[in-house]
Image (cartoon, rainbow, N blue to C red):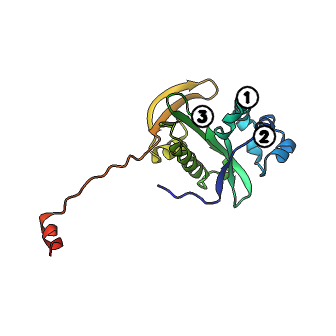
Amino acid sequence: MPQSHPDVRILHLTPAAFHALADGDAATAATVIPVPVTPYLLGPECGQVWRRRAAQCDADPRAASWVTGLVWAGSLNKAVGAAGFHGPPDSSGVVEIGYGIDPDHRGNGYARTALEDLLSRAIRDPRVTRVRVSIAPDNLASRSLATAFGFRQVGERIDAEDGLELVYERPAYWPEVRCTIRRPEPKKLAALSR
């Protein structure tokens, strides 16, 4: 499995931060978010995600620790993307991951590191049995990243906002540990017994 960038963290947000981002309010965001954010994160490309998460956290403040946070790059001292779960585990133990990196910062391993961190969190929570991610068919980079982490396509769906999405899932505990006993060849056995 690839190594994480040590200077990348997912920062959880407060309801006030979700609302500031949803409104594209840079001045308020600067007072309620501890790191600078890129214009992309305050722009229309991310607005719907922030509005959805703001409403979700208004309804259940405990969801804030699960839902989308900011991908903070320490070496740049700013947030360069968003990543998190769509919510806490559902009744069957499934969590869905979402992530997006500012186009100006793609290709630096931030999405990979965010995905590693989210999977690590999912594995540590005993309620989580499966992890899901939905990806646009033309997003080859994201599909490649997901399959590198053991996700396999299990179907497709039409999202009201994003259109057709391919649905990928994997067990929370992947790769499964399998122990196989390899028996030494007879010649090697003889050498070992000397």
Dot 3, how many residues are within 10 Å of its Cα: few (below 14), some (14-19), or many (20+)?
some
Estimate how packed mark 2 is, as few (under 14), some (14 to 19) or many (20 or more) residues with alpha carbons within 10 Å: many
In the displayed orientation, state which residue is furthest to the front. Answer: 126
- Horizontal and vertical percent for residue 180? 27, 53
Q: Residue at 53% x, 48% y: name it.
A: 120
Asked if residue 26 lies left or right of residue 143, the reply is right
What residue does disc 3 label? 88
Q: Give the alpha-carbon distance from disc 2 to disc 3, as whole Å.
A: 19 Å
Mark 1 or mark 3, earlier in chain? 1
Mark 1 or 2 closer to N-term?
Answer: 2
Residue type beneath disc 3? Pro
The CA span between labels 1 and 2 is 12 Å
Assign a secondary structure to mark 2.
helix
Q: Circles 2 and 3: CB distance less than 8 Å?
A: no
Q: Amino acid at mark 2?
A: Ala
Tell me the residue at 58%/52% (across/down): 113
**Mark 1 is on which residue type?**
Ala
Q: Quadrant of the C terminus?
A: bottom left
The dot on residue 55 is 1
Residue that label 2 marks: 17
Label annotation for residue 124: none
Q: CA distance from mark 1 to mark 3?
A: 15 Å
Residue name at image x 76 percent, y 36 percent: 15
